[in-house]
Image: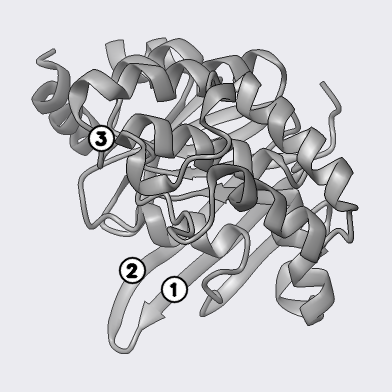
Amino acid sequence: MPNKPLVEVKKLKKNYGDTEVLKEIDGTVMPGQVICVIGPSGSGKSTFLRCLNMLETPTSGQVLFEGKDTQKFSENELTTLRERMGMVFQSFNLFPNLTVLENLKLAPIRVKKMSDKDAEEKALALLKRVGLGEKANVYPDSLSGGQAQRVAIARALAMDPEMLLFDEPTSALDPEMVGEVLAVMKELAEEGMTMVVVTHEMGFAKEVANEVWFMADGYILEKNEPNEMFDHPKNPRTKDFISKIIGN
């Protein structure tokens, strides 16, 4: 694993008016690392994720990508950043008027100027990879939630990202569909994809993460490798949260 960070977060703060959502966040993401961010609702996890690829502009502090301050990026550099740091949302965000295949081809053709033929080949290979090769020509409204989220992951992969951000990718799914999405994410982790995952799936975090970050009240209160975090949490707030979630 290379020893230079892919992302460094330094004293990151984010305010909405008088409300401090992120109070002072520090963190480092190394290439190939899987970080799961856990914590109660309203603790700033999604805002933190959106600050990483500048979907939200920090109020102060820095997010460095390969050592460069993302707040100093031009519009073109930000577009490239979001290609390289793909995002998978809770709500899929697929275009309902386009087929699954067209959803996957759109950004590579428009942004990367890929030919239609190359984009189609890539899209079909990615759909096969997430177990949905037969769904290329259907529309998103005919998919189950789990299938739609797997298409959303394939669409993010179509841009060849170096890193993926997942914002509670299973929280909108029926319980029986969660496993199929987590299986794809686990496979990506095993292939070495750098991932930051905001999740309530503690089993996934324990099995797949290299490091778990616990967030509450706008701070990262604890970071540790999964077994230590879940079996021996140190911060009282972490202990309380984990005991409520998994009954330790």
Residue type (three-letter) at the residue carrying disc 1: Lys
Quadrant for the C terminus, please. Answer: top left
Residue type (three-letter) at the residue carrying disc 3: Leu
* Percent x, y of residue 28: 64, 42
| Residue ID at (19%, 33%) | 236
Res. 143 visible in picture: yes
Residue type (three-letter) at the residue carrying disc 2: Val
Dot 1 falls on a residue whose secondary structure is: strand
Tag on residue 14?
1
Res. 64 visible in picture: no
* The quarter of the displayed image where residue 228 is located: top left
* Percent x, y of residue 197: 47, 37
Residue on which the image places disc 2? 21
Dot 2 falls on a residue whose secondary structure is: strand
Please tell me which of labels 1 and 2 falls first in the chain.
1
Please tell me which of labels 2 and 3 falls first in the chain.
2
Residue 239 in the figure: left or right of residue 21: left
Question: Which numbered mark, 2 or 3, is in the foreground of this view?
Answer: 3
| Residue ID at (54%, 64%) | 51
Residue on which the image places disc 3? 173
Tag on residue 80?
none
Above or below, 41 against 135 in this view is below
Residue 230 in the figure: left or right of residue 48: left
* Distance Cα–Cα, label 2 vs label 3: 26 Å
Dot 3 falls on a residue whose secondary structure is: loop
| Residue ID at (35%, 30%) | 146
